[in-house]
Image (cartoon, grey):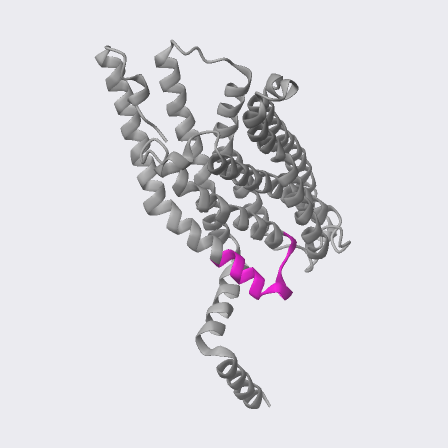
Amino acid sequence: MWSCEDFNYTDNTEDQQLCHDFHLVLFVFSLFYLIICFPTGLCYNVQLVLVNLYNKATMTMPDVYFVNMAIAGLIINAVAPVYFLGPAYTKWSLLNFGNEVYITLLILFNVSSLVIMYSTTLLSLDYYIECALPRTYMSSVYNTKHVCGFVWGGAVLTSFSSLLFYICNHVSTKIIECSKMQNREAADAIMVLIGYVVPVLAVTYALVLILQIRKEATPLDQDTGRLDPSVHRLLIATVCTQFLLWTPYYVTLMVKTFTNVKSNDLIYIRTFNFIEGLANFLAFSSSCVIPLLHRNINKNFHSKLQRLLKKLHCGNQGCSQESTVVRQVMT
C-alpha cells in the first residue's frame, strides 16, 4: 500500500524521514485492520446474513437492506487483505496497477461501495415512506428485495467504466479513439457522481422529511404495525457512520480526478498518498463498524440470533421434542 523506494533518489533526509513516518503510521493501521477489523467484520457480517436468512418470515424492510450491506461488506473484507498486504509490501507482480487482478479487485470494491451507499440511501427513503404511509406495503419486504436486486445490477453496470479503462489501457496502441480517452479520470468521476453526490442529496432530502414528520404527533404513532422505534436510532447511526467513513475516500477520489499532481512536488505527493491511505482505511473499516451498530442497536436481532443458536444446538429432532413437551404442558 505504501513504499518509499520510489523516492530514494532524493538526498533530503527530512523528506525521507517524513516518508518513513507516513509508512509507519499506515503500517500500524494496516495491522490493526487485519488483526481486529477483518475477523470482526467477517464474523458479524456472516452472522447478520445467516440470522436474517434463517428468520425470513420475520424479516422487515430494514433487515433486507442490512443483509445487502453485509454481503457487500463481506466482499470488501475479501478485497482488504490483498490491498493492505500489497503491492508495496510484498512486491507481488500480480498486483501491479493496471493488470487483471488489480482491475478485478477495483471492480469488486466499486460494486460493493455502490451497494453500501445506495442501500443506506434507499433505507432512508423507505423509512420515510413507512413513517408517512404505514401499512401501504410500498416499502414491504417483497418490494425491497426487488429494489436491492436492481441496486446490485446498477452497481455492476456503473463499475463497467473501470473495466473499460482496463480494456483501453491494453489496446490503446491499436485504437486511436480509445487512446485519446481519459478513462481513469472518467471512471473516477462517474464513481464520485453516482456513488457519493447522488446518495448525499437523496439521504439529505429523506432525513429532512423524516425529521418533519416526526415532529408532528399523529394517531398513526400508536399503530402497532409500524416499525420498532429503535429502527430510527439505527437509521440515524447508520447514515451518519456510512458517510463519515466514506466521505474521505470520495474526497480523495475527487481530488485525483479534477486536479493534476506535479511529479516534482514530492512533499505534496507523499502527503496526498498518506491521506489517501487513511481514507481507504476508513472506507474498508465500514464493513466492520456497520454490523456492530446493527447488532447493538437493533432490539430484535438478539432474539433472532438466539433462535438460530438454539436451532444449531438442538437440531431438528431436539427442537421438535421440546415443542411437543411445551404443548403438552400447556394443554
Residue 232: x and y in percent read 59, 47
Residue drawn 37% across the image and 33% down it: 87
Up-down relation of residue 260 to residue 160 (above or below): above
Does residue 188 appear in the picture of this structure?
no
For residue 304, say whether it is visible: yes
Quadrant showing the C terminus: bottom right
Residue placed most toward the observer, 270 or 301: 270
Residue furthest toward the left?
Answer: 13
Left/right of residue 68 with respect to residue 25 in the rendered view: right
Where residue 35 appears, x then y in whole percent?
32, 46
Q: Position of residue 203 (x, y in %)?
A: 63, 35
For residue 297, side relative to residue 145 (left or right): left
Q: Nearer the viewer, residue 6 or 126?
A: 6
Q: Residue at x 75, y 54 (%)?
A: 137
The answer to whether residue 60 is magenta is: yes
Dominant SS of magenta comes to helix
In which quadrant is the N terminus drawn?
Answer: top left
On the image, the x and y values in percent for residue 26 come to 33, 31
Residue 230 placement, left or right of 135: left
Instruction: From this view, report whether residue 289 is shown above or below residue 264.
Output: below
Q: Which residues are magenta?
A: 47-61
Marker count (numbered): 0
Residue 180 vertical position relative to residue 101 in the rendered view, above or below: above
